[in-house]
Image: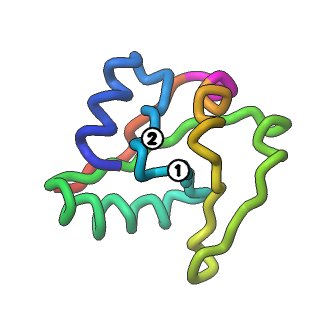
């Protein structure tokens, strides 16, 4: 994620992911650190000057209602969470959202 999204996570005391913008109908949490690192390093830095990799745990029963989507190579897997489901998704995060890597 970029710095603006991270600022919103900090404001939530690392408990919630920010709402999507009107032109973002889907939230795409990726399933592995390698893919998340690619996005943060290769896309977010160029787009906004910084990229952050976050990690969080989501209730498995809740998450099972969504399929894992493969969107490229074998490591490019993510969930497609409709924006209107994000509040419920946030309620199913266990613990806090951690920043585990930063790129500039």
What is the span of residues highlighted in magenta in the rendered image? 91-95
Queried whether the magenta region covers residue 82, the answer comes back as: no
Estimate the spatial distance between the alpha carbons at disc 2 and disc 1, rounded to whole Å.
Answer: 7 Å
Q: Position of residue 16 (x, y in %)?
A: 49, 26
Main secondary structure found in the magenta portion = strand
Who is closer to the viewer here, 53 or 3? 3
Q: Position of residue 9 (x, y in %)?
A: 38, 28
Left or right: residue 23 versus residue 95 is left
Who is closer to the viewer here, 31 or 29? 29
**In percent of the image, x 29 and y 66: which residue is there?**
43
Q: Position of residue 2 (x, y in %)?
A: 28, 48
**In percent of the image, x 61 and y 57: which residue is there?**
31
**In percent of the image, x 54 and y 49: which residue is there?**
27
Left or right: residue 79 versus residue 25 is right
Who is closer to the viewer here, 7 or 56? 7
- Quadrant of res 56: top right
Q: Earlier in the sequence, mark 2 or mark 1?
A: 2
Q: Secondary structure at mark 2?
A: loop
**In percent of the image, x 64 and y 55: which residue is there?**
80
Outermost residue on the bottom side: it is 73
- Quadrant of res 89: top right
Q: Residues within 10 Å of mark 2 (few under 14, many from 20)?
A: some
Question: CB under 8 Å between callouts 2 and 1?
Answer: yes
Q: Position of residue 71 (x, y in %)?
A: 60, 75
Left or right: residue 63 versus residue 37 is right
Q: Secondary structure at mark 1?
A: loop
- The residue wearing badge 2 is 20
Q: Residues within 10 Å of mark 1 (few under 14, many from 20)?
A: few
Quarter of the image with the C terminus in it = bottom left
Left or right: residue 41 versus residue 50 is right
Question: Please, which colouring scheme is shown?
Answer: rainbow
- The residue wearing badge 1 is 25
């Amino acid at each position: 994620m970029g710095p603006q999204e991270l600022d919103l996570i900090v404001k939530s005391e690392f408990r919630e992911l920010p709402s999507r913008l009107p032109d973002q109908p889907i939230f795409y949490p990726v399933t592995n650190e390698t893919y998340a690192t690619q996005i943060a390093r290769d896309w977010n830095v160029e787009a906004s000057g910084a990229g952050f990799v976050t990690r969080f745990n989501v209730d498995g029963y809740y998450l099972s209602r969504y399929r894992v989507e493969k969107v490229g190579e074998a490591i490019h897997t993510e969930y497609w969470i409709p924006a209107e489901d994000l509040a419920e998704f946030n309620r199913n995060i266990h613990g806090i959202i951690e920043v585990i890597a930063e790129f500039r």
